[in-house]
Image (cartoon, helix red, strand yellow):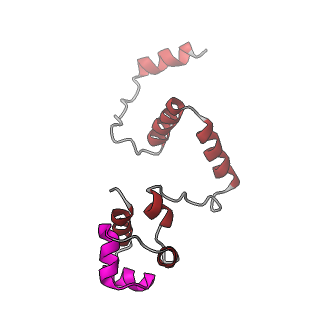
């Protein structure tokens, strides 16, 4: 979706609101809401501020970029992990995502492993000595 109008409509639908309800929140008539969404008119700042107060991502509506989720809910360890993850190269991030999916059983392509035979287990044990 390109432009303010389609993103405004996307936000309205994400929140499960009608044009009438959305317009009421922003202080405009439903026909004005329709014109905003179609791109015929540009919304005013006070309209966007009222919508933002009710959960609309105004940054997304204006720029197409989602507002980052606040980090204040993270523990110190979680924040540290996130910071370290962001410093990794793209390849290392991909490898870490793969590992996490495997560890949390979220890897749909995961194959079940066959149990080790007694001979194979003995061979591996001997090799580790």
Residue displayed at 37% across by 31% down? 113
Please state the horizontal and vertical placement of residue 6, each as a whole percent of the image: 33, 63
Start-end of magenta stretch: 18-40
Answer whether residue 26 is magenta in the image: yes
Instruction: State whether residue 16 is above or below residue 21.
Output: above
Residue displayed at 47% across by 75% down? 44
Q: How many marks?
A: 0
Is residue 18 among what the camera can see?
no
Residue displayed at 45% across by 36% down? 98
Please state the horizontal and vertical placement of residue 115, each as a whole percent of the image: 39, 30
Instruction: State whether residue 115 is above or below residue 9.
Output: above
Looking at the image, residue 102 sits to the left or right of residue 70; the answer is left
Residue closer to the observer: 91 or 115: 91
Location of residue 86 by image quarter: top right
Residue displayed at 61% across by 14% down? 129
The quadrant of the picture occupied by the N terminus is bottom left
């Amino acid at each position: 979706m390109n432009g303010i109008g389609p993103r405004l409509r996307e936000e309205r639908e994400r929140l499960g609101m009608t044009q009438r309800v959305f317009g009421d929140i922003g202080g405009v008539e439903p026909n004005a809401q329709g014109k905003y969404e179609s791109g015929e008119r540009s919304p005013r700042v006070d309209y966007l501020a009222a919508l933002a107060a009710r959960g609309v991502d105004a940054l997304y509506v204006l720029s197409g970029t989602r507002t980052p989720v606040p980090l204040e809910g993270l523990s110190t360890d979680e924040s540290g992990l996130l910071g370290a993850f962001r410093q990794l190269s793209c390849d290392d991030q991909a490898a870490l995502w793969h590992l996490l999916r495997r560890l949390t059983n979220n890897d749909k392509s995961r194959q079940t492993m066959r149990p080790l035979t007694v001979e194979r287990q003995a061979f591996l044990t001997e090799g580790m000595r």
